[in-house]
Image (tube, grey):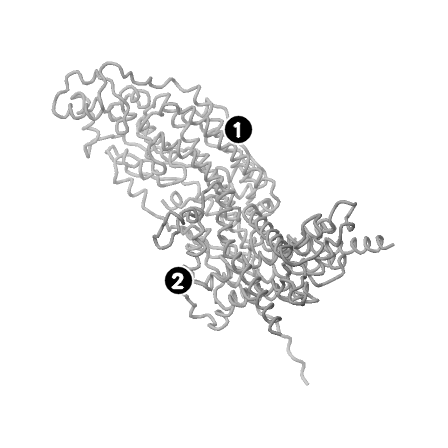
Amino acid sequence: MWVDIGITVFNVLVAGLFVLSLAGLLTWVERKQSAVMQDRIGANRADLFGWDPKLLRPIRRLGLFHPIADGLKMFLKEDYIPPEANKLLFSLAPFLSLFCGLIAFAVIPFCDKFQVWGKTVSVQVASLDIGVLYIFAALSMGIYGVFLAGYTSKNNWAYLGALRASALMLSSEIAIGVSIIGVVMLYGSMEIGDIVRAQQAGPHDLLFGFLPKWGIVMQPLGFLLFLTAGIAATKRIPFDMPEGESEIIGYFVEYSGMKFGMFMMTDFVETIVVAGLTAALFLGGWHIPYFYPAHTGGWITVLQVLVFMLKVCFLCWFMVLVRWTLPRFRYDQAMRLGWMGLFPLAIANIVVTGIMIVMSNG
Amino acid sequence: MAAEPIRETRTDNMMLNMGPSHPAMHGVIRIVVELDGETVVSSDTEIGYLHRAFEKEAENATYNQVFPYTDRLNYVSPIINNVGYALAVEKLLGLEVTERCKYIRVLMSEISRVCDHLTCIGASAMELGAMSAFLYMIEAREFLWELVEQVTGARLTIAYCRVGGVKADLPENFEQEVATRFQKVREVLKDVDGLLTRNRIFIERMDGVGVISKEEAIDYSFTGPMLRGCGVPYDVRKANPYLVYDQVSFEVPTQTGCDNYSRYLVRMAEIVQSMRIVEQCFPKMPKGPINVDHAGNVMEPADMVDTAKIGKTHDLPLIQLELSPNLEGLEKKQHREVMAPDKGVVLPAKNDTYGNIEGLMNHFMLIMEGWGIQPPVGEVYQAVEGANGELGYYVVSDGMDKPYRVRVRPPCFAFVAGLHKMIDGGMIADVIPTFGSINMIAGELDR
C-alpha cells in the first residue's frame, strides 16, 4: 500500500510541477516569443535585487528572472476587494478557476505503463476509464471561476466579461467534445493512455504502409477542430473576448495582486492542458515515430516522458504563435464559428469516421 | 382559483461609462453608452479632456511663437499643422516662400502623413488584438521619425516651420536616407498587408462596421480618409492646391464601403501615394546649398559668434561657416534657399546677425516685443490636407505683432460629432475599431 501511495504522490508531483513550472515559463515564452516576432529584444532587466554576478548574467540577459519578479510583484501588491463585492465568492473565484485548470491534467499520461517493484505503473496521476469525459468536466467547471469573478465584482465591465466567457464556453466546449468523438471511435477507448497506445500499436500497423496511425493523420479535420476549440477554451487571442483588454478590460478587472495572477496563470495552465490533450490524442503522446521499444521502463520511460514534454512544449509554442498573430473575434462571431462552423463540421467528422470504420472492417 | 398573473421579465438597459480611463479611449474622451445586452442603444460622447486653450494662447504669442503650440494639435503629424499655420500667416502677409522651401514643406508633410496613417492603422489593429501588426507599424514609423529628427532636430514637438520659411534646410544625403527608409517602410507595409488585409477575422471586425452614409458624412462635414472611405474624392491637395501639390502627380484613393474597412484601405493606399509624392519632390526640387568648402577661412561658428560679441566684426561676413548643430540651416547660403527674402518677417541668417550691424538690427527689430512681424489688418482662412482631413486655420490680424484670433478647424471634431451615428445599433465591441478608424487625436480635437 505504501508503494501505491508513494507512486501516486510521485505522479502528482511530476504532473503538478510540470504544469506549474511550464505555466511560469510560459509567461517568459510569451514575452520573448512576441519580442522575437515583433523585432524587439523583450524583457531583460530583472535581476536579484541588484545582485548581478557574472555567472548569472546570461540568465538575466535572457530575461529568465522576470517570471520570478512577476510572482513576487503579484504577492506584494495590495489585494483589493471592492466594497460592493461578495467577499467569499470574490475570493473563491480565482482559486476555483486555477483548481479546475490544474486537475484537468491528472488523466494525461506522460509515458507507457512499465513494471516497478512488481507493479504496473505509469506517470499518470489517475488512469480513469472515462478520462476524456473527465477532462471536459474539469475544463467546463473552470467557467464557474470566471463567471463568479465577473458576477461578484459588481462591475459592469466584469459582468459583460463573465457573460461573454459563459457564451464562449458553451460554444467551445461543445465543439471540443464532439470533435474528439472521432478519435474515441477510432481507437475504441475513453482512457487516454489506451488511446495513445493504440496510435502506434506495432511496426506493421502503418497507414499506407509508411505513416504512423497518429490522430493527426487519421483525424486531420478532428485535429483542426479540436485545436481551434481548444484555443477558444483557453480564452486567449483570437478568442479572448472575456478579457478583451481594449474592449471591456475583462472579467478580472477588479482583481489585483495574486488573485489576478491566478487568473493569468489559469490561462497558461489551460493552454498546457489543451496542449497536453492534443499531444496525447493527436500527436501520438509519448511515441517516437518508427521506434518500437521491445520493453518499457528504465531509460525508455525517461525518453518517453521527455518526448511527451517536448510535444507539449511545441504545441504551447504554436498556441503562443497564434496568439501573437491574429486579431480578436467579436463575441457573436466566435459563437457563430463555434455553433455554425466547428460543431457541424465535427458532426460531419463523426459520420465520415463511422462510415470509414464500417468500410474498413468490411 | 384565480389564474396566476403572467410574470414578465423586466429588463433594463445598462449604462456604461466608457472612458476616460478605458484602454481604447486613451484617457482623453468619454463615451457614455447605453447597452441592451451588448448592443449599443445610444451613446453620448464627451470631449474636452485635453483642452489646453490653444486658441487663447495663440492670441498672447507673437506670430512665430505660435508654432510650438501648433505642434501639439495633431501630435502624430505636427509638421502638417506647422505648414498650415505658416501658410495662413503668409497669406495674411502676402508673402511667397522660396521654391525649395515649398518642396521641403510638401515633402515633410507627406512623411508626416505616412507616420500618421501608420499610427492610425497600427493602433486600430492593436485594439483588435493584433499586437504584432501594431509593432511592425510603429517600427516603420520609427524609421520615418528618424528622418524627421534629422531634419528638424526633434521627433515630436518639432516647431519646424517659420513665417516665411522653415527652420533648417534638409541635411546632406537626405535623398538616400529617404530611399533606404522608404524601402523598409514598404517591406513593413507588405507584411502588414499580409497580416491584415485579407485576414478573415480582421475583415469581419472591420467590414460593415461603423457605417455612415455618404450623405450623412457630408452633412457632418467629414473630410479626409473618413470621407474618401465613403466614396467622395475630396482632398484639399487636389481641390484647392497649395504649395506645389499641383506640380506633383498623385491619386486620391477612394472606397465606397463607408465602413471601417474602407477607411483602412484608403489609409493604406494613401501611404503609398504619399511616398510617391516624396520621391517626386527630390528631382523637382531646386538645387540646395553646396557643402561648405573647408579650405581657406574656416571658422567654428561658436568662435565666430564669440569674436563678433567682442566687436571684431571686420571681414566676418566673408568667412564661410561650417555646419554646426546650433546654427545649422541658418547659415547664409542655406538661409537664402529656404527663407523668403523679406526682412520684415524673416530673421536674418546667424552670420549676418552676429557679423554686421544691419543684421543685428534686423534681428533685434523682429525679436523685440511689440515689433516683430506685423501683418496688415485682415483675416484669412487657409486649409491644408491634414492626415485626418481638412485642417483649416483662420487667422485675424489687427495690425499688431500678435494674432488677434487664431481659430483651428480640426478634422476630428466632425468625426467625433458623428461618432454616435456610427456606433449606435452596433455592438460594444464595434465601438473600438470604429473609434480607432476615426483616428481621433485629442490634441486637435480639444485644442
Q: Are marks 2 and 1 on the same chain?
A: no
- Can residue A336 be seen here? no
The local secondary structure at tag 2 comes to loop
**Residue placed farthest to the top in the image?**
B296
Q: Is residue A120 left or right of residue B99?
A: right
The residue furthest front is: A117
Percent x, y of residue A288: 67, 50
Mark 2 — on which chain does it sit? Answer: A
Under mark 1, the amino acid is Glu
Mark 2 — residue?
A77
Disc number for residue A322: none
Q: Residue at x 43, y 27 (%)?
A: B178
Within 10 Å of disc 2 (Cα), the crowding (few <14, some 14-19, many 20+) is: few
- Looking at the image, the residue that sits furthest to the right is A362
SS class, disc 1: loop
In what quadrant of the picture does the N terminus of chain B appear?
A: bottom right
The answer to whether one can see residue B346 in this image is yes
Residue toward you, B153 or A97? A97
The quarter in which the C terminus of chain B is drawn is: top left
Report, in whole angstroms, how far the alpha carbon at label 2 lies from the one at label 1. Answer: 55 Å
Residue in view at x 18 percent, y 28 percent: B364
- Image coordinates for residue A307, horizontal then vertical, percent: 62, 52
Identity of the residue drawn at 25% across and 40% down: B60
The label on residue B251 is: 1
Residue A292, compared with residue A120, is above or below; it is above
